[in-house]
Image (cartoon, grey):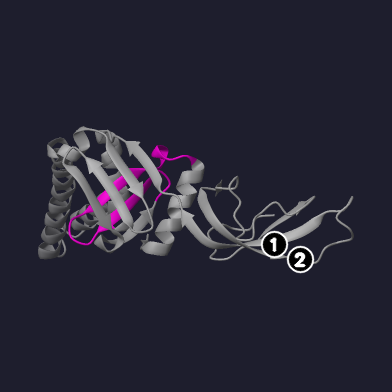
Amino acid sequence: MLANPSQSSYSLRRHCQSCTHDRRGNWPWLTEWGGVNITKFSAIPMRRRGSSRGRRNACIFRPCEVIMANIDTRYRLAQAEFMDACSVHWKAQKLGTFRSILSGVVAAIVGFALLFFIFWLAVFLLAFTGVLFLFIWFRSLFWRWTFRKARRYNSDISLSFGEDGILEETAEGKVDLPWDSYSAYLDAPDFILLYRKRNGFTPIPKSAFSPHQAASLLELLKRKLKKIG
């Protein structure tokens, strides 16, 4: 039975007619399980149960070295997907479009109600409503323009996630980014957002991964970055 491969130590128990591993515990046929490349094992034989004839021996194997396989993906974002990812980001920052519109509507109603009682406060609330709606419109316009102008979104994006960082290949070129280039990540129902320390975030659709890859990636991100949202 195999335990969780993400743990630093686990056991492989195998019952066999005779011990088929060598003294170093190498199993050449066992190279991958659950997305984990397993390269070396140390064998700890248990006591023999009865004679070797007609009985089975029990052996426990512990890994000396476990290497996580890279998680690779390739995808292209449509503008609608990009704007959905932006909405997820705004919502995480407490600046979601729905929340902002609701705040503007409430401010407008209160402003009109106070128009004949506290004139200056009514004017302030109505002006706040106008500025808020203008901000919502300009923000959407700006990010749509950003998507159209960004070279990275005009072609496929390739990402390879490993223990040391992320290898990113876009139309802008290839760059190897260590994990300390990122500050946090956000796990949303349809997207994973990787926040860089200096400039914005990288939206990754979960549809670019198989269910097993997505689960492995989230485990990796959990170990490497702080989760927000």
The magenta span reads: 188-210
- The residue beneath circle 2 is 46
x 45%, y 50%: residue: 69
Label 1 crowd bin: few (<14), some (14–19), many (20+), radius 10 Å: some
- Location of residue 165 in the rendering, given as x and y in whole percent from the top left corner: 32, 56
Task: Inspect the magenta stretch and tell me whether residue 198 lies in it.
Answer: yes
- The residue beneath circle 1 is 60
Q: Which of 88 and 124 is in front in this view?
A: 88
Q: Which amino acid does label 2 sit on?
A: Met
Task: Inspect the magenta stretch and tell me whether residue 217 lies in it.
Answer: no
Label 2 crowd bin: few (<14), some (14–19), many (20+), radius 10 Å: few
x 18%, y 37%: residue: 171
Q: Which of 215 and 191 is in front in this view?
A: 215
- Location of residue 158 in the rendering, given as x and y in whole percent from the top left corner: 30, 40
- Asked whether residue 210 is in view, the answer is yes
x 25%, y 55%: residue: 177
* Labelled pair 2, 1 in contact (Cβ < 8 Å): yes
**Left or right, 200 with reference to 221:** left
